[in-house]
Amino acid sequence: MGYRIAKKLQACQGLKFHCVEISAAAIERLGSSNIATVPLQDALHFAQIVILAVPDAKAADVAREICDQVERPLLIVCLDPAAAYAGVLPEKPSISYFVCHPCHPMLFDPEITPEVADDFHGGRAIQDIVCALHLGGEEDFQNGVGVAQIMFAPVRHCYRISVKQMAMLEPALVETVSATLLSAIRELQQAVVEHGVPESVVRSFLLGHLRLELGIIFEFAGIPFSDGAKLAIQNAKERLLRTGWKQEVLREASIRETADLIVGRSSSTKSSQH
């Protein structure tokens, strides 16, 4: 992610930026694109905005290192809501925090033509982004939006929401539920293969039906499920999903537990802080 962002910043004329990196392989990769790296202290000497393109579990440590070295106003941009929502980011009067995240190019988007098809958003296909101000003022938010639009370009819509609302989107909606259920589908795909159905057949049948079913469920296909499919879905929901699962997933304590897990904050750590 840091490499993608660096490439975007590099392409923005008139923008001065420095990259801080500790991985030898990453430094070499940046160098191959004529992007130099500098020590953190040198980068902070002039920086007005710092982008934390680091693992969620390291965000608080890196932010703390930055706060210890900077006394003037500084905006820190986080690429995920977990650290902000978990409350692990260090607070300092001169430090503001802005959180943003890409929505990624949508399925069934008529603006994403074959010429710009981009499954993992390498910068060709248009996408929306979500943004939230964690700590700071309106000017901080606007500055954060400006950077986010460069990082995730081309951007169609920039949606302003709260950090709490962003945490309902990720991890709750797209990781706790969506990614989990999709990984279960992948596991069942392999189980069907192990039961003797040829792998090429399973893959073709599953991926084709996934496309169709997503189109039906999200109302892009213009057709309903068959009566038999509706019965199978209802029967499976009653067997596979617990009553009240949606309320449980969106319960604040559940989302916070997942955020704590993502940032590496254990229950013992939380207990020692109270």
Image (cartoon, grey):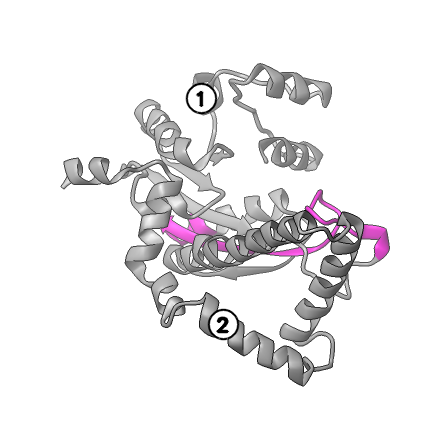
User: Which residue lies at the image location 82% right of the left edge and 58% below the top edge?
Assistant: 113
**Residue 4 position within the rendered picture, expressed as x and y whole percent measured from the top left:** 65, 35
Instruction: Give whichever of discs 2 and 1 has the lower sequence position.
Output: 1
**Residue 244 position within the rendered picture, expressed as x and y whole percent measured from the top left:** 36, 71
Q: Which residue is mark 1?
A: 45
Where disc 1 sits, the SS reads loop
Check residue 154 in the rendering and tell me which mark sits there, or answer none. Answer: none
Residue farthest along the bottom direction in this orientation:
227
Say if 37 sits above or below 254 in the image.
above
Q: Is residue 209 left or right of residue 267?
A: right
The reply to whether residue 218 is visible in this rendering is: no
**Residue 155 position within the rendered picture, expressed as x and y whole percent measured from the top left:** 65, 54
**Residue 254 position within the rendered picture, expressed as x and y whole percent measured from the top left:** 32, 56
Residue type at mark 1?
His
State which region is magenta: 114-141
Q: CA distance from mark 2 to mark 1?
A: 56 Å
User: In the image, which is nearer the foreground, mark 2 or mark 1?
Assistant: 2
Residue 31 in magenta?
no
Residue type at mark 2?
Lys
Say if 191 sits above or below 208 in the image.
above
The quadrant of the rendering that contains the C terminus is top left
User: Which residue lies at the image location 76% right of the left edge and 60% below the top edge?
Assistant: 205
Residue 119 in magenta?
yes
Say if 59 sits above or below 147 in the image.
above
Q: Nearer the viewer, residue 14 or 4?
A: 4
The quadrant of the rendering that contains the N terminus is top right
Q: Which residue is mark 2?
A: 237
User: Which residue lies at the image location 38% right of the left edge and 62% below the top edge?
Assistant: 249
User: Which residue lies at the image location 40% right of the left edge and 31% below the top edge?
Assistant: 58
